[in-house]
Image (cartoon, grey):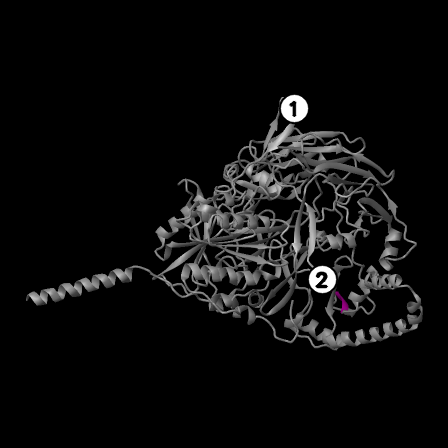
């Protein structure tokens, strides 16, 4: 009996142990490289095509058109809102047949090679082009080559007698083709067509030649008669006739151009060249070429304005392109770092094209101030225009509206300058103890009334002013965030705007469209569904297209009127091909911030082979703000930093933090003011702890973190501030040393102190915590990455951190992307696998150790021609 009792006890204990083991989630030990390989950028292009309705409003009606591509091909759609009708612009089957008959190249309905279309002849016809068959193009090229060879032979004797220097000039001339020649060359690559919408008649345009492409240097007046440009740091202009000469032949010696200014010099230029993005070799090579001038025209073309910046005292910075050909090349540029005394000095200049006089606006008020000229909104129906000149806000040339901001960004004035005298009138003053921000002005009846965006009561709202700057009415109020003006109906006196955080029970970041009367009454929500909305409204303020989704829904598009009525279903994105290879929607969540009070909103991404009985490492993808929090609110196919990374065997989390996104209260947005290194870290940690408490499949002992730019800075800071919590970080292009990052971001979001001595002299004091100062705290695994020619967040940020880690005797990993700037360009996919390897190795304990990244190699065509 005793033995029997002992036996049952042992069985019971065994079952208890097995039960305990069964109840405890088992950590994963194998990384899954196959799943993320299904969703490479190349593969994604073939799984999902259009993800929204890209609206093109027409000029002569309230109609609009769009192209919507699916796995069944492209659909070319035109919508008539007034009639609530949706039609194909043409029948794809008939169009394919006609194109085949006319060009002798085979087409079918699913493979129409039409990239874009233009509505012409008062929107009654469309123009489009299709590329010529490669064989046809090759034959034309051979004929052209033979003609050039014959021409060259005829000139051979003459060329041989010329000096070497003249030969070089001839070569340069061959490279510098005229705009007309370029247009002709481009036109020859295509068949050109006109299609009449009413009759369905298709005509091939045999001798079609589009307008020559506008050169980057040409700032063309609204009436097209004056072209302004820069050269040798000064301003020049030419008239329309001489510009047309240049288009035909850039070397035409009869071209007349006129010099407007004579006092420009390097770094105190009228065309604002700072050298960033241009190597010293290219700078020397291009010194005599025309340059673009950043000017803003009056509507009548009689005047233009510009901001001239004196950067002569701003200190230099450098990067070296080590993979440049034929030898490494230096790039020198001006870069103002926070706290430095040598700041750019800005001035507003107004030019009168009748008198050719220059006037300086009397805009000085704050030391080292910033100024910004306000510009008019482009009508949405002009989006397909080849060129839209930037116009100043006032429809008349007598007033130039601008804003000026103190260096500490606590003071902003909304002003206008009298363009005849330069006298300045202040209309609106904004003052706060942290930084002030503004949005573009709403402009009514050419400035008789103004709609101003302000956070003066702690939330972003709209305020109605008269033209003299007297407050008439606060239009919106309450604990929600107004975002931007979409339209103003001056006759009906209605403002249309987007806002978020007003609707109960929703993620407060979801944008909606609203209308409100200009007397502050009649606030109405126009797109009610619980989604994140993006709208496009026509110029008449009658209709809008509403694109909406969440991270856990397929995108959808509706046509609505501005009373909030849904008129027409437009499109729903088909994700079935993506789902067939395993895609699953992520999960949204809400947690409390580290203060236990503030609500934070995030998204959790799981592996598609998720097993709830297992335990997964968790990785936080971070960006600290304060411009954004990098938390998706709408569906996106771009998932390299989120759902695609999760497929290796991770739970990937994105979440906001106090001091992050601006689309909450001013308190929330400015939480990190004065503490730019550490302000968001406690919230990231608290989020992961709460999620781990809710979900036993999250392994709190294996926490990773990564981010780019500000996120690179934040992810390294997390490893150093909470070294026993965060175990692995991959930090790319991080501004680890904000004292050497640019003044505009660092001084704004961290704060700079304006100091006035007894004699009234003003200086600025700046001090900020740096990652290098706490390098000694490193316990986990850290990979820091930078591009060697990053002229935004300079590589010195990463190198100084590396220096501090070495001095602290820490093991860490460092990777340099050669020839890459801030975003790593065409090496991004390589970085995806590099980052994944690092997390797999240190969080899972299993990673690919092959020399070749096979997942990348499988995407390459081995055609004998190396792809760049």
Q: Is residue 600 above or below residue 819?
A: above
Q: Name the one closer to the observer, 217 or 833.
A: 833
Q: Residue 745, percent across and down?
A: 60, 42
Q: CA distance from mark 1 to mark 2?
A: 54 Å
**Residue drawn at the location 74% of the way across and 36% of the way down:** 347
Question: Magenta span has 420?
Answer: no
Q: Is residue 416 above or below residue 529?
A: above
> Which of the two labelled residues, at mark 1 and mark 2, occupies the earlier sequence position?
2
Q: Which residues are magenta?
A: 190-197
At label 2, counting other C-alpha atoms closer than 10 Å, the crowd grade (few under 14, some 14-19, many 20 or more) is few
Tell me the number on the disc at residue 760: 1
Q: Name the one closer to the observer, 717 or 133.
A: 717
At label 1, counting other C-alpha atoms closer than 10 Å, the crowd grade (few under 14, some 14-19, many 20 or more) is few
Q: Which secondary structure, mark 2?
A: loop
**Residue drawn at the location 72% of the way across and 55% of the way down:** 384
Q: Quadrant of the N terminus?
A: bottom left
Circles 1 and 2: CB distance less than 8 Å? no
Examine the image and state in which quarter residue 141 appears: bottom right
Q: Is residue 631 above or below residue 149?
A: above
Count of residue discs: 2
Q: Principal SS element in the magenta part? A: strand
């Amino acid at each position: 009996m005793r033995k029997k009792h002992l036996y049952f006890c042992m069985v019971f204990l065994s079952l208890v142990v097995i039960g305990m083991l069964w109840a405890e989630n088992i950590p994963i030990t194998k990384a899954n490289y196959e799943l993320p390989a299904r969703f490479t950028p190349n593969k994604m292009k073939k799984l999902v095509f259009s993800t929204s309705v890209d609206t093109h409003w027409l000029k002569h009606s309230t109609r609009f058109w769009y192209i919507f591509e699916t796995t069944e091909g492209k659909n070319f759609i035109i919508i008539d809102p007034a009639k609530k009708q949706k039609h194909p612009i043409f029948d794809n089957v008939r169009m394919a047949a006609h194109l085949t008959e006319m060009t002798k190249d085979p087409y079918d309905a699913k493979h129409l090679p039409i990239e874009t279309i233009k509505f012409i002849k008062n929107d009654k016809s469309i123009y489009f082009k299709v590329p010529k068959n490669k064989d046809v193009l090759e034959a034309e090229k051979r004929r052209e080559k033979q003609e050039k060879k014959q021409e060259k032979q005829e000139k051979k004797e003459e060329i041989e007698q010329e000096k070497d220097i003249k030969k070089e000039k001839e070569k340069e001339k061959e490279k510098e083709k005229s705009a007309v020649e370029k247009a002709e060359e481009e036109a020859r690559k295509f068949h050109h067509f006109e299609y009449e919408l009413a009759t369905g008649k298709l005509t091939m345009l045999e001798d079609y030649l589009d307008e020559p492409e506008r050169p980057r240097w040409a700032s063309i007046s609204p009436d097209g008669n004056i072209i302004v440009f820069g050269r040798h740091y000064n301003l020049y202009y030419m008239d329309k006739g001489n510009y047309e000469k240049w288009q035909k032949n850039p070397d035409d010696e009869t071209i007349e151009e006129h010099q407007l200014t004579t006092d420009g010099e390097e770094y105190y230029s009228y065309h604002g060249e700072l050298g960033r993005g241009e190597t010293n070799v290219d700078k020397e090579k291009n010194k005599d070429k025309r340059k673009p001038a950043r000017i803003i025209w009056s509507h009548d073309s009689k005047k233009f304005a510009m901001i001239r910046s004196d950067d002569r005292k701003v200190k230099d910075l450098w990067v070296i392109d080590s993979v440049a050909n034929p030898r490494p090349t230096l790039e020198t540029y001006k870069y103002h770092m926070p706290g430095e005394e040598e700041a750019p000095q800005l001035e507003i200049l107004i030019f009168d094209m009748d008198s050719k006089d220059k006037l300086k606006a009397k805009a000085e008020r704050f030391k080292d101030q910033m100024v910004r000229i306000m510009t008019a909104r482009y009508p949405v129906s002009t989006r397909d225009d080849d060129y839209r000149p930037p116009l100043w806000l006032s429809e008349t040339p007598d007033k130039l509206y601008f804003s000026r901001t103190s260096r500490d960004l606590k003071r902003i004035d909304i002003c206008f300058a009298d363009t005849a005298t330069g006298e300045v009138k202040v209309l609106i003053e904004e003052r706060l103890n942290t930084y002030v921000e503004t949005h573009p002005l709403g402009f009514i009846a050419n400035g008789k009334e103004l709609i101003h965006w302000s956070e003066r009561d702690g939330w972003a709202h709209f305020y109605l002013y008269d033209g003299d700057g007297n407050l008439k009415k606060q239009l919106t109020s309450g604990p929600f965030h107004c975002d931007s003006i979409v339209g103003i109906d001056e006759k009906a006196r209605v403002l249309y705007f987007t806002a978020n955080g007003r609707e109960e029970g929703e993620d407060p970041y979801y944008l909606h469209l609203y209308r409100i009367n200009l007397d502050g009454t009649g606030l109405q929500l126009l797109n009610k569904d619980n989604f994140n909305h993006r709208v496009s409204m026509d110029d008449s303020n009658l209709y809008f297209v509403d694109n909406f989704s969440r991270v856990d829904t397929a995108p959808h598009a509706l046509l609505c009127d501005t009373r909030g009525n849904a008129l027409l279903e437009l499109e729903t994105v088909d994700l079935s091909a993506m789902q067939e290879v395993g895609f699953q929607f992520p999960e949204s969540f809400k947690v409390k911030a580290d203060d236990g009070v503030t609500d934070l909103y995030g998204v959790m991404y799981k592996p598609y082979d998720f097993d709830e009985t297992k335990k997964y490492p968790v990785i936080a993808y971070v960006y600290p703000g304060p411009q954004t929090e990098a938390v998706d609110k709408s569906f996106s196919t771009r998932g390299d930093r989120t759902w695609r990374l999760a497929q290796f065997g991770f739970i990937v989390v994105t979440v906001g933090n106090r001091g992050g996104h601006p689309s909450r209260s001013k308190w929330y947005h400015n939480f990190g003011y004065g503490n730019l290194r550490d302000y968001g870290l406690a919230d990231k940690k608290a989020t992961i702890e709460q999620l781990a408490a809710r979900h036993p499949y999250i392994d709190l002992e294996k926490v990773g973190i990564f981010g780019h730019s500000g996120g690179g800075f934040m992810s390294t800071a997390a490893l150093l501030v909470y070294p026993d919590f965060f175990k692995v970080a991959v930090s790319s292009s991080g501004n680890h040393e904000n004292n050497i990052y640019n003044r505009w971001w660092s001084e704004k979001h961290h704060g700079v102190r304006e100091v006035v001595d007894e004699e009234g002299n003003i200086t600025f004091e700046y001090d900020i915590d740096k990652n290098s100062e706490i390098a000694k705290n490193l316990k986990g695994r850290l990979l820091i990455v930078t591009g060697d020619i990053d002229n935004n967040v300079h590589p010195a940020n990463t190198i100084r951190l590396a220096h501090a880690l070495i001095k602290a005797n820490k093991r860490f990993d460092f990777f340099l992307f050669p020839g890459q700037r801030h975003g790593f360009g065409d090496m991004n996919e390589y970085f995806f696998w590099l980052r994944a390897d690092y997390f797999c190795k240190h969080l899972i304990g299993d990673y690919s150790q092959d020399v070749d990244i096979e997942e990348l190699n499988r995407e390459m065509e081995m055609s004998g021609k190396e792809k760049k």
